[in-house]
Image (cartoon, helix red, strand yellow):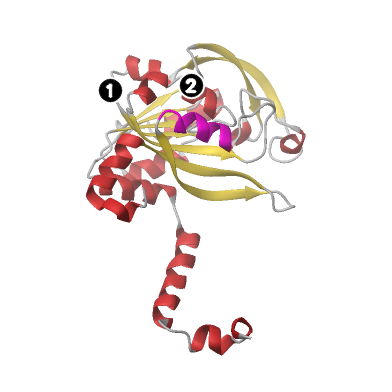
Amino acid sequence: MYYKSFFSRFVFRRKLWRKVTGKLQYYSRKVFKDEFEDLRFVFDAAQIEPEVIVDGGANIGFVTHQFRKSFPKAKIISIEPSDKVFQKLKEAYKADTAVLPLNVGISAAPGTMEFNVNANTGTSSFLHPNAYHASHLAKTKLETRTIRTISLDSLAAENNLDRIDILKLDIEGYELEALKGAEALLAKQHVRAILLEVNLIESYERQPLFFEIAAYLHQRNYFAFNFYGFHESKLRQSILTNLIFLSGDFRNRIKDRFGNECGW
């Protein structure tokens, strides 16, 4: 009967106040958990101030704005392949010398590719939406355009970047291909933190899922740090989330300061 009684479970429980504060902290964290705040936290823990951030799939610049607030000293390269959306991004940051907007796509290699432009600009992609996505968020396709692509390694070379402190990729199912174009950077652990949109079920045809991306990064000494937000179907199936990965070198720097408190 212990667990059926409110008084025995809560009121007369030993260390009640610690249990209550622990629960409050737990639920507060669930409600207010934020990837930008956590990136600020881990870089402060490592005693590193980010200098270079790449916002892949910048759209009109909301995430770029979040990065500008959290990391005011960093240079941000904001990449958006859709022409019309890019013009809004460029206009929004025309007076900000810390932001470099680029009108290209990110792929495994430099070149050109066919890009599907949708009315819902957040769903435009190199990939075709599956039946579920096409009947929900990606309903209306406007056109297919041939666009120029770069790799992240070529981006680093062209801009004389030795390192990317934070790499954000929200490119509608093409995240793994983009990571394949960062092979040199990843091999040298020259991307410290990666913020990715990952899917648990497909939104696009032949889209790599969370476990494939996690395995690819784990093989290159990158480790999942935390999950943020969710998007569910009506059947409560989680479709996608944001996920932070940290390089092994960056993670070890934090561990050197905090030891077993890290849990690593």
In which image quadrant can residue 33 be found? bottom left
Q: Residues within 10 Å of mark 2 (few under 14, many from 20)?
A: some
Give the residue type at disc 1: Asp
- Residue located farthest toward the top when viewing the structure as drawn: 111
Q: Which residue is drawn at 51% across and 32% down?
A: 215
Please tell me which residue is depicted at 48% across the width and 14% down the height of the picture.
109
Q: Position of residue 201 (x, y in %)?
A: 67, 39
Give residue 183's position: percent from left, percent from top: 42, 20
In this view, the residue in front, 123 or 250, is: 250
114 to the left or right of 229: right
Q: What element carries label 2?
A: helix
Q: Residue at image x 28%, y 37%?
A: 50
Q: Which of marks 2 and 1 is in front?
A: 2
Numbered-mark total:
2
Q: Residue 162 shows which numbered tag?
A: 1
User: Disc 2 designates what residue?
Assistant: 180
Q: Give the range drawn in magenta.
A: 211-220
- Would you say residue 170 is visible in this rendering? no
The answer to which quarter of the image holds residue 131 is top right
Helix, strand or loop at mark 1: loop
Extreme residue in the front direction: 1
Q: Residues within 10 Å of mark 1 (few under 14, many from 20)?
A: some
Would residue 149 be visible to someone looking at this image?
yes
**129 vs 46: above or below:** above
User: Separation of disc 2 and disc 1 at Cα?
Assistant: 18 Å
Q: What residue type is disc 2 on? A: Lys
Nearer-the-camera pick, 186 or 194? 186
